[in-house]
Image: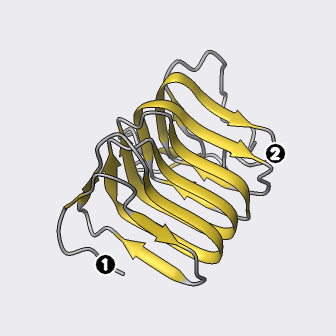
């Protein structure tokens, strides 16, 4: 499924409950009214959400009981509670995406073996709540041929607003 224009919705916008679905926003914006979900994915395998933005939802991407969910190049703005919520989501990825002005950037519960890299997270409450075992970096490297989410030329991790740790780039998780 590929969008052909911007969408304004007063409740939840998309619900995906079947396997092998690609939702391509094609650079368009999905705007809500502060309630519902931008997209809810449940009981599905091999789902891709890519190339656009969601703003003004209660929760933007909410997924439960999903394997192989791939989120690429998605911008989340002004979510009331959560940018990306995974409940029992496994072997999935979030790449090249951002969550700004959200309560919580990532909320992962009972979710394992997911890869989260080259993203920008700027939450108003906290960045991540994760009780599983997930991977927040890939192998670290720099190249003049690459541009990351914040315009630099190194890849491997994520940009976390309010991050208080240090990262030498030496580790992969």
Q: Which residue is mark 2?
A: 132
Mark 2 lies on a secondary structure that is loop
In this view, which residue lies farthest toward the top? 164
* Percent x, y of residue 124: 47, 22
Q: Residue at x 54, y 47 (%)?
A: 84
Q: Which mark is residue 29?
A: none
- Tell me where residue 38 appears, x and y as whole percent: 41, 55
Which mark is first along the chain, 1 or 2? Answer: 1
Residue closest to the far left? 5
Q: Is residue 73 above or below residue 43?
A: above
Q: Is residue 63 above or below residue 32?
A: below
Distance Cα–Cα, label 2 vs label 1: 32 Å
Q: Give the residue number, with chain letter if any, for mark 1.
A: 2
Left or right? Give the position of 155 relative to 30: right
Q: Is residue 116 left or right of 151 when viewed as pictured?
A: right
In the drawing, does residue 165 fall left or right of residue 100? Answer: right
Place of residue 48 in the rendered image (x, y in percent of width and height, measured from the top left): 51, 71
**Label 2–label 1 contact, CB within 8 A:** no
Label 1: few (<14), some (14–19) or many (≥20) C-alpha neighbours in 10 Å: few
Q: Residue at x 71, y 52 (%)?
A: 87
**Residue drawn 26% across and 74% down?**
3
Q: Seen in the image, is 88 located left or right of residue 16?
A: right
Element marked by disc 1: loop
Q: Position of residue 11 (x, y in %)?
A: 35, 53
Q: For this rendering, which residue is in front, 12 or 126? A: 12
């Amino acid at each position: 499924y590929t969008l052909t224009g911007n969408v304004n919705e007063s409740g939840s916008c998309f619900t995906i409950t079947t396997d092998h679905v690609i939702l391509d926003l094609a650079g368009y914006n999905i705007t809500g009214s502060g309630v519902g979900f931008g997209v809810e994915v449940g009981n599905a395998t091999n789902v891709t959400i890519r190339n656009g933005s969601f703003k003004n939802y209660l929760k933007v991407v909410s997924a439960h009981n999903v394997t192989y969910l791939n989120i690429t190049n998605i911008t989340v703005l002004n979510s009331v509670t959560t940018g990306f919520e995974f409940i029992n989501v496994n072997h999935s990825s979030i790449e090249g995406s951002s969550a700004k002005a959200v309560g919580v950037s990532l909320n992962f519960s009972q979710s394992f073996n997911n890869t989260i890299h080259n993203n920008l997270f700027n939450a108003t409450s906290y960045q991540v709540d994760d009780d599983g075992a997930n991977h927040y970096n890939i192998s670290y490297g720099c190249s003049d041929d690459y541009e990351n989410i914040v315009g630099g030329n190194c890849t491997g991790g994520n940009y976390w607003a309010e991050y208080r740790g240090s990262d030498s780039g030496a580790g992969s998780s």
